[in-house]
Image (spheres, rainbow, N blue to C red):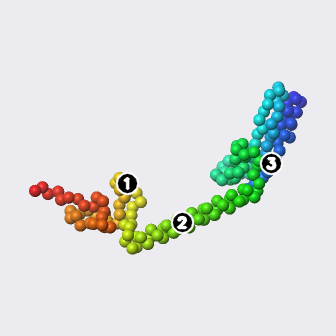
Amino acid sequence: MNFARSLLRSFRSAKKLVGTDHLGNKYYEVPERTTAFGGHRRGRRFIESKFTHDEYKPGMVPIEWEAWIRWKRKEPPTAEEVLGRERMTQIVKERAKEIDRKEKECKEKEYQEGLVARPTQTVPKGHASAPFYERTETSADATQTGKDFQPGAWQPSSSKK
């Protein structure tokens, strides 16, 4: 029993705290070692998260630390590296929101000027590639032309001659 305890004690003491992130997660490494029977065991890297499994959401482990845990990088990341990447991610998100806002304004201007017909439904009743625009009533007279044209709005008269 003492042999098992000594092995367990040596394994526990072998883990080394490598770093923490701004979210409070702690990252550990167990170095490579030789087993009791002369074999070789690869080191381990793991995380002690302050979040429970139910609380976890994607992004709670920074990308740089995840790459380190999965042996994609040798050295653990620095706090500056993690925060710098998060700042850049935030800048990209803000720029994307600005582009979306400008695109919506441009689209609304096109609708108001009559350059583009406004869709009446987000999901058309017919085929997925045939959306409906502003006019939905059908007519036997082919009066729609140009920007007023509505696919499927004209039906030939059913009277036989």
Name the amino acid type tagged 1.
Ser
Mark sitting earlier along the chain (3/1): 3
Looking at the image, which residue is at 56% across and 67% down? 98
Q: Where is residue 4 drawn, in percent x and y? A: 85, 30
Q: Is label 2 in contact with label 3 (beta carbons under 8 Å)?
A: no
Q: Residue at x 68, y 59 (%)?
A: 86
- Secondary element type, mark 2: helix
Is residue 53 shown above or below 150?
Answer: above
- The residue where tag 1 is placed is 129
State which quadrant residue 3 falls in: top right
Farthest right residue? 2
79 lies above or below 42 = below
Q: Which secondary structure lies at badge 1?
A: loop
Q: Quadrant of the C terminus?
A: bottom left
Q: Residue furthest front?
A: 74
Marks 2 and 1, how far apart at CA: 26 Å
Camera sees residue 125: no
| Mark 2 crowd level (few <14, some 14–19, many ≥20, 10 Å Cα) | few
Q: Is residue 126 visible?
A: yes
Q: CA distance from mark 3 to mark 1?
A: 54 Å
- Circle number at residue 99: 2
Q: Is 96 on the left-hand or right-hand side of 34?
A: left
Q: Position of residue 11 (x, y in %)?
A: 83, 37
Looking at the rendered structure, the kind of residue marked 2 is Ile
What amino acid is at disc 3? Val
Residue beneath label 3, please? 18
Q: Position of residue 114 (x, y in %)?
A: 37, 71
What is the total number of numbered labels drawn onto the structure image?
A: 3
- Answer whether labels 3 and 1 touch (C-beta < 8 Å): no
